[in-house]
Image: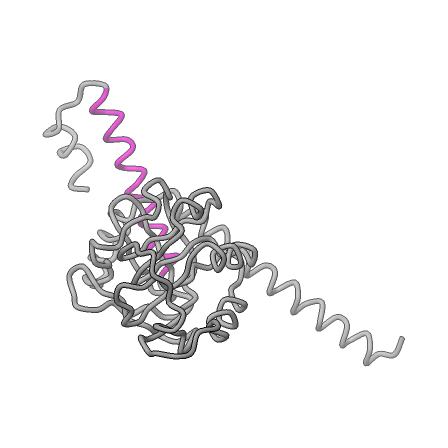
Amino acid sequence: MSMTGTQSGTHSGTQSGTQSDKQSDKEQIRLRFMEVDSSNVADVLDTMGLFNQGLAPQFAPYPATAGRIAGWAYTIRGQMTPYAMGGDADKMTACQGLSPGEISVWSGDGEGICYFGELIAIGMKERGCTGALVDGGIRDIRWLGELGFAVFAKYRTPVQSIGRWRVTAWQIPVFLRGASAGLVEVKPGDFILGDEDGVIVIPAAIAENVLVEAERLTAIEKNIRIELKNGLTLAEALKKFGHV
């Protein structure tokens, strides 16, 4: 083998290893986020001056037993527009870009229609997508539950999007309805966390720092619960641990 070939092979192997390491690190962060509450994350973001990262309270899990969503945002945008029946090729193309550990984040002006149902969800799960966040409608809820694919959406509806709503772009910044502000920006790669309290968006650049502080608050809360169970009064707990 020539020196050039050796150098090329080494460089390629190094790049592959680095990408694999990054993906592993991101997955570890994602799994750690699964162990903290959105409320603690919201409190941390407040201390950092990011007061409007929570999404509107209408976002709810489908089915109700779906559990949490936690992953890196892969954004998809669409709009209401009449078109001939026969499917939305761009929707399929967009979903094919999903990677393991990502949450598909759907935005648009859809009213009364579902952005996707069971079959699209199957395709997303096959690609390692860990759930979906939908600023619009969803259907096939029973089958989504059996599939084990968690979705947080604004509403449910039996009405399909074909002929009514279509995908227009993906992996661009999108805006979803917020809890304390009109709209919340979600950029590709931001972190999405949804649980019983609602959904919050963590900017990618600070995701790990937010996680570390949220884990610290989680540990304090666990100790408070233990102390209260052992007979400590709330006033004594607040004096000992401070406001949480």
Whole-percent x, y for residue 164 in the image: 34, 73
Viewport quadrant of the N terminus: bottom right
Residue at the farthest top position: 231
What residue appears at the point 49 percent right and 57 percent down from the top-left corner?
119
**Range drawn in magenta:** 207-229
Magenta part mainly helix, strand or loop? Answer: helix
Task: Determine whether 146 is above or below 194 in the image.
Answer: above
Nearer the observer, 201 or 218: 201
Whole-percent x, y for residue 53 in the image: 24, 61
Whole-percent x, y for residue 231 in the image: 18, 18
Q: Quadrant of residue 216?
A: top left
Nearer the observer, 184 or 80: 80
Left or right: 111, with 97 as reference point? left
Viewport quadrant of the C terminus: top left
Find out whether residue 214 is within the magenta segment: yes
What residue appears at the point 42 percent right and 62 percent down from the top-left corner?
104
What residue appears at the point 37 percent right and 54 percent down from the top-left corner?
139
Q: Quadrant of residue 199?
A: bottom left
Task: Determine whether 7 is above or below 207 in the image.
Answer: below
